[in-house]
Every structure is written in C-alpha cells, then in structure tokens.
Image: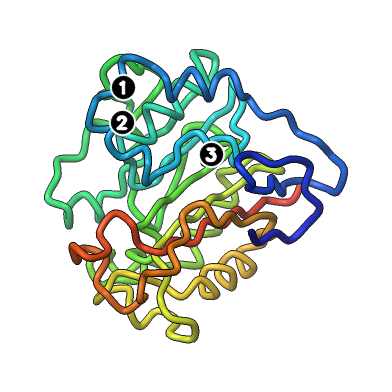
C-alpha cells in the first residue's frame, strides 16, 4: 500500500490517507454496505464486483451522505453506487464530455436530464473538455480509466492544464480529485495513451501538482503485478484486470 501522509484507519487492509495527520474522517459504512447490497442493482453490475471491489473503493473514498460527486466520462455502474451512498440529500453529476461521446459514438443525454432509472439524484452535465463547468461545487470529482484519453487526438486536442485547473476550481476547498487509470511502463510518459491506452502514473502526479493539487492518497486495490504493462487494455489477456493506479489529490483548504 502506498500512502503519503498519516492514515487514520483501514478497510480490507487499505489505508485511508486523507486530510491532515490525526484528523479522523468517519467512513459512511452503513450507506456503503446498503449501496452494494441494493437488490435493485443489475446482475451485470454484481458480476463485476469481484474485479471492481466496490465496497473497498467506496470506503477508501469516504464519500458521505449529502456529498456532491462528479463522475467525468460517467459509467452507470459507479454512478448507481455513488447515488445510493450520497442519498437523496446528495447529488451525482454525470459529466459527459462531448468530444468523448462523439468518439464513443454515443448520444449525449440532454443537460439536466436524469437518465439513470431509479436514481433521480444523478443529473447529466454536458461540457466540452476545455470549458469544464459544474452546476455546483463538488466534494469529490472522479475520472476512471479515461484520463489518458485527454492526451489523444480525438479530444480536440485537449488543453490538459486548463482541464485540470477547471477541475480544481469545480471542487470545494478540501475537495478531492480521484484519478484511476491503466499503468504504462515507468518513464514512457504519454507514449502509450493512444496505442495501448495506458499512461505513466508519474505524468498524472506532475499534471496535478501543476494545477495546484496535493497528492494525498493512493490505493493498491486495483493493482495487478501480472499485467505486463505493454498490452492493449482491450486485449482479452488483460481486459478487465489491468494494473491500475488509484490516486487521490486534494484542493487545499
């Protein structure tokens, strides 16, 4: 387990490393358990739980009821869980980047729509990559397995510095930006983003430091040492179980 500051607890052996040393933040254990056990979750979601570790991931994030969470390049699996954990007093922004939807050949839902059945607190936000805006400040912003795409030609090109600064501004003071992505070999920087769809973790750390974020936590939950790091992430030999870094950055209070 990698961590950068003092940790106040652990879930399934994973340290929770946010805030200042000795400042314990309660984990919303009951709401997480209820979210994962929700009988309304699709069978397809449950089938991937063993690989995604939803209870442990949500506990590591220590999302609380009433929080506002923004999911950039959203996925229904995680948005259903975020929705249940934050509850009706919280909100989840499903942030569609038009450039990403165009490349994925999916129709962008209307801004402000609630398209996730049974989860009315999940609201669609439509944005372009270089002009990211949220309707309200977020407690946590998350991008999973798509940060590397920001470096690829189909994104416009994206102004990475402007994007990260917009994320910074969209967070409440003390809010967190979570980046999960496929690991590329050390030292390769952004060479693999448009080929194997991976990124050197150190690039992400450098990008976030430049935007003003503090690196406050990392988890080994999604690591896989058997991944050779040179295979396309869609290859059947690694698809669904690539080696993934899981970083948490914080906007200073």
23 vs 218, left or right, is right
Tell me the residue at 31%/79% (across/down).
230
159 or 232: nearer the eye? 232
Q: Position of residue 101 (x, y in %)?
A: 21, 49
Mark 1–mark 3 distance (CA, rounded to whole Å)? 17 Å
Asked whether disc 1 touches disc 2, contact meaning CB atoms under 8 Å apart, the reply is yes
Q: Nearer the viewer, mark 1 or mark 2?
A: 2
At label 2, counting other C-alpha atoms closer than 10 Å, the crowd grade (few under 14, some 14-19, many 20 or more) is some
Q: Which residue is mark 1?
A: 41
Q: Residue furthest left?
A: 105
The quarter of the picture where the C terminus appears is top right
Local secondary structure at mark 3: helix
Q: Earlier in the sequence, mark 1 or mark 2?
A: 1
Q: Which residue is mark 2?
A: 46
Q: Which residue is mark 3?
A: 56
Tell me the residue at 33%/14% (across/down).
39
Q: Earlier in the sequence, mark 1 or mark 3?
A: 1
At label 1, counting other C-alpha atoms closer than 10 Å, the crowd grade (few under 14, some 14-19, many 20 or more) is some
């Amino acid at each position: 387990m990698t961590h950068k500051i003092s940790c106040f607890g652990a879930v399934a052996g994973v340290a929770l490393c946010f805030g200042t040393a000795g400042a314990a933040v309660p984990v919303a254990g009951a709401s997480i358990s209820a979210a994962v056990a929700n009988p309304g979750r699709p069978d397809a979601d449950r089938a991937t739980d063993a690989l995604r570790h939803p209870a442990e991931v949500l506990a590591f994030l220590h999302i609380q009821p009433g929080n506002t969470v923004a999911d950039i390049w959203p996925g229904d699996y995680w948005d259903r869980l975020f929705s249940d954990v934050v509850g009706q007093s919280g909100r989840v922004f499903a942030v569609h980047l038009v450039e990403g939807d165009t490349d994925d050949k999916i129709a962008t839902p209307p801004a402000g729509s609630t398209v996730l059945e049974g989860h009315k607190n999940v609201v669609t936000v439509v944005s372009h990559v270089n002009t990211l805006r949220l309707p309200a400040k977020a407690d946590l912003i998350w991008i999973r397995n798509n940060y590397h795409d920001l470096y690829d030609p189909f994104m416009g090109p994206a102004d990475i510095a402007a994007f990260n600064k917009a994320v910074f501004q969209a967070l409440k003071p003390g809010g967190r930006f979570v980046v999960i992505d496929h690991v590329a070999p050390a030292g390769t920087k952004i060479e693999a983003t448009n080929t194997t769809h991976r990124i050197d973790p150190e690039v992400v750390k450098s990008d976030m430091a430049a935007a003003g974020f503090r690196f406050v936590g990392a988890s080994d939950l999604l690591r896989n040492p058997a991944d050779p790091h040179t295979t396309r992430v869609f290859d059947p030999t690694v698809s669904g179980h690539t080696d993934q870094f899981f970083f948490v950055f914080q906007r200073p209070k």
